[in-house]
Image: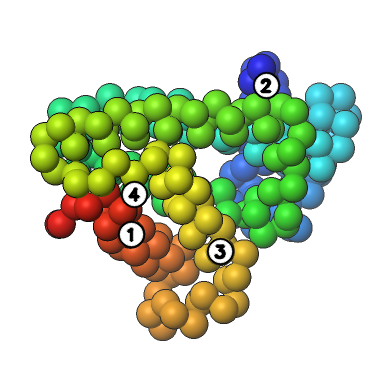
Amino acid sequence: MQEKFNEKQINILEAAEKLIIKDGVENASVRDIAKEANVSIAMINYHFGSKDKMMEALYCYCTEKIGERFSLFIQTISYAGPPIQISEIISFLVKQILRLSYFHNIGLQEVSIRNNLAETLTVLYALFVDRVDDIILKGIAAGHFKKAAKAEELLASIIGTLMFSIWNKDFYQGFLPQNAQYLEALEHKNSVYLRAMIFGLLGYDE
């Protein structure tokens, strides 16, 4: 079952996310988060127990939000042809996963094995596979795609590529344009590569 957050918890989590994106995990203290959320430190401890537990909850909360955004996003591109839908989904996933790169830089990927997080991720992955499978079948029927690639394997390729670039920032930065804004350049490079790879696996010529 997915985690359910009450209004006070959401207020704290959104304040934490705002500060962490701005200052980094190490520099966003519980005191700073409490001030941003306009609550006491005791209130944070009451709802989450510790900063680590709060970060786990934030990871879960953000993942749930990605799933909600993805469901709405799929509706907005439903009018487009299968190749455009696949291209837009790649752009969406790249942007959303890179936006959460601050989690992966501190090793929080390990907490995904815990029940709430594992279940939240499973729901998100299943949603992706279901929608992309449908798009692929329609693309094959319409003659756009020549190969019936498996959606779960495409998802693994996308996430694996993005995780490599996030976990190996010092190495990967050397392949980005000098003086470029890091995340923007990383998003562009990964999006271009993943489109070429996914369309190749689908047998689609752009």
Q: Give the class, few, some or many, for how many residues have Cα within 10 Å of label 2's Cα (few <14, many ≥20).
A: few
Image coords of residue 44 (percent x, y): 81, 31
Identify the residue at image location x=56%, y=58%. Answer: 163
Viewport quadrant of the C terminus: bottom left
Circle 1 is placed at which residue position? 197
**Distance from the alpha carbon under mark 4 to that under mark 2:** 27 Å
Q: Which residue is mark 2?
A: 3
- Comparing marks 3 and 2, which lies closer to the viewer? 3
What's the residue type where badge 1 is placed?
Answer: Met
Q: Residue visible at 65% across and 50% down? A: 103
Q: Nearer the viewer, residue 201 or 121?
A: 201
- Residue that carries the numbered disc 3 in the rendered image: 164
| Mark 3: few/some/many CA within 10 Å (<14, 14-19, 20+) | few
CA gap between label 3 and label 2 equals 28 Å
Lower position in the chain sequence, tag 4 or tag 1: 4
In-image side of 110 versus 184 (left or right): right
- Mark pair 4, 1: CA separation: 13 Å
Q: Position of residue 20 (x, y in %)?
A: 65, 50
User: Where residue 76 sits: x, y (%)?
Assistant: 25, 28
Q: Could you say which is closer to the camera, residue 196 or residue 33?
A: 196
Query: Which mark's residue is nearer the viewer, 3 or 4?
Result: 3
Residue name at image x 34 percent, y 34 percent: 132
Disc sitting over residue 91 in the figure: 4
| Above/below status of 130 relative to 170 | above
Mark 4 or mark 2, which has the lower sequence index?
2
Mark 3 to mark 4: distance in Å?
A: 17 Å
The kind of residue on which mark 2 rests is Glu
204 displayed left or right of 191:
left
Tag 1 secondary structure: helix
